[in-house]
Image: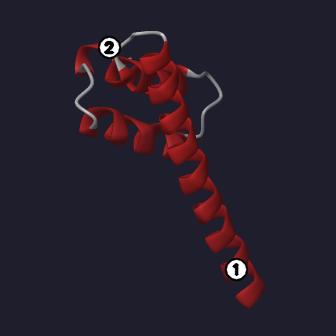
Amino acid sequence: MKQIRNIGTAAVVAAVLAAGLTFGAARVEAKGKGGDSQAAVCAYLLQVITYPYVNSYIKEFTISVYLGQGCDPSKLP
């Protein structure tokens, strides 16, 4: 049971780190191209939401982050 808990904790930490690195990379890439970093993050989140094979839990979490970032809700499917 303890091993399962450790694996779950490791998975959550990995997901948070991956999300942070992805958002950071999107912002840096947008600033390097002279674009809007907020628009780059919103576009990335929208790609995750509209991906056909995304898990329902990840999709709902991404939608809440999308709305929390102040992205345009009219673009949601």
- Please state the horizontal and vertical placement of residue 54, each as a whole percent of the image: 60, 33
Please tell me whether residue 39 is drawn above or below residue 19 in the rendered image. above
Q: Is residue 61 visible?
A: yes
- State the SS at label 1: helix
Residue that mark 2 sits on: 75
- Looking at the rendered structure, the kind of residue marked 2 is Lys
Please tell me whether residue 54 is drawn above or below residue 44 in the rendered image. below
- The residue at the point 72 percent across, 89 percent down is 2
- The residue at the point 42 percent across, 45 percent down is 61
- Badge 2: how crowded within 10 Å, few (<14), some, or many (20+)? few
Residue that mark 1 sits on: 6
Q: Quadrant of the C terminus?
A: top left
- Please state the horizontal and vertical placement of residue 12, each as a whole percent of the image: 59, 63
Which is more toward the observer, 77 or 3?
3
- Please state the horizontal and vertical placement of residue 14, each as a whole percent of the image: 64, 58
In primary-sequence order, the first of circles 2 and 1 is 1
